[in-house]
Image (tube, rainbow, N blue to C red):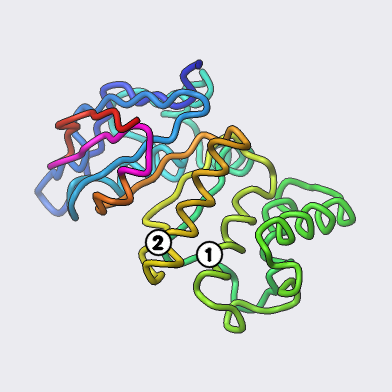
């Protein structure tokens, strides 16, 4: 399997007044195509910072980030946004659905930004929502859906442009344990059946052990890399 995501000696430093805070300190992570990798650590360990860098939401202070062989560490925000829109699907703890849009409209949104034709957007969104058991919920807005249904809409949205990478940030954090297990089973299926590369960011030990490999973060450093399966 070829390397899809590579962080090489990556630092992220924030200036807070006269103080410099190193959120990440020279981390190295390689995620290969088709892998399911968890980045695990307690609050303040640098997980969110690592997620933002992997997801092309930010750039490092030092070091290199390669996505599919291309160095993205010094790109402009507009270039990052373009790559983000094509290569990475996001699943967030708080779902991040747009409340005024229906489930169908939320799923079509990423395709709108990519300039996909309207008929094609709708067909793709309908297919995805049916795949996740939401065929009868397409016209419902988020406040008319359960937490589990909202997260399934979010997963469908993450797949809208068929990106190679799904980045899941505490995806079960707002769900009960039964629904959380269903969401994790869905992510595992996306990995095993459809070949999606999954990067899971979590503090939860049980969740992390759903992955093939765990990268443990503490105080901005990788302190352990553990193969699970």
- Find numbered disc 1 in the image and state the secondary structure of the residue it sits on: helix
Q: In front: 13, or 195?
A: 195
Residue 173 is situated, as x and y percent measured from the top left of the image, at 36, 64
Which disc number belongs to residue 172?
Answer: 2
Which residues are drawn in magenta? Answer: 209-219
- Which residue shows up at 52% across the image and 28% down it? 34
N-terminal-most mark, 1 or 2:
1
Residue placed farthest to the left in the image?
19
The number of numbered badges drawn on the structure is 2
Residue 220 is situated, as x and y percent measured from the top left of the image, at 18, 39
- Which residue shows up at 51% across the image and 34% down it? 197
- Find numbered disc 2 in the image and state the secondary structure of the residue it sits on: loop
Q: In front: 192, or 98?
A: 192
159 inside magenta stretch: no
Q: Do labels 1 and 2 touch, CB within 8 Å? A: yes
Residue 110 is situated, as x and y percent measured from the top left of the image, at 67, 53
- Mark pair 1, 2: CA separation: 8 Å
Q: In front: 205, or 112?
A: 205
Which disc number belongs to residue 92?
Answer: none
- Which residue shows up at 33% across the image and 34% down it? 60
Q: Is residue 22 left or right of residue 86?
A: left
Return the residue at label 1: 151
218 inside magenta stretch: yes
Picture quadrant of residue 87: top right
Question: Is residue 171 shown above or below 98?
Answer: above
Question: Is residue 30 shown above or below 150?
Answer: above
Q: In this view, does 216 lie to the left or right of 102?
A: left
Picture quadrant of residue 79: top right
Picture quadrant of residue 136: bottom right
Q: Is residue 16 left or right of residue 134?
A: left
Q: Is residue 95 left or right of residue 209?
A: right
Question: Is residue 173 shown above or below 168?
Answer: below
């Amino acid at each position: 399997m070829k390397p899809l995501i590579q962080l090489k000696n990556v630092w992220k430093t924030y200036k807070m007044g006269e103080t410099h805070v190193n959120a990440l300190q020279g981390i190295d992570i390689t995620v290969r195509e088709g892998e399911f990798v968890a980045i695990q650590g307690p609050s303040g360990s640098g997980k969110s910072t690592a997620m933002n860098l992997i997801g092309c939401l930010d750039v490092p202070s030092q070091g290199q980030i390669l996505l599919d062989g291309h160095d993205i560490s010094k790109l402009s925000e507009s270039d990052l946004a373009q790559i983000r829109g094509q290569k990475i699907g996001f699943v967030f703890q708080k779902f991040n659905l747009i409340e005024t849009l229906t489930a169908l409209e939320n799923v079509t949104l990423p395709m709108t930004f990519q300039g996909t034709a309207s008929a094609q957007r709708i067909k793709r969104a309908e297919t995805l929502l049916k795949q996740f058991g939401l065929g009868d919920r397409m016209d419902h807005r988020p406040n008319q859906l359960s937490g589990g249904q909202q997260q399934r809409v979010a997963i469908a949205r993450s797949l809208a442009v068929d990106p190679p990478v799904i980045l899941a940030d505490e995806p079960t954090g707002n769900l009960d344990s039964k629904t959380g297990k269903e969401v994790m089973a869905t992510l595992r299926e996306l990995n095993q059946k459809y070949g999606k590369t999954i990067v899971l960011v979590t503090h939860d030990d049980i969740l992390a052990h759903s992955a093939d490999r765990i990268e443990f973060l503490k105080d901005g450093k990788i302190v352990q890399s553990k193969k699970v399966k």
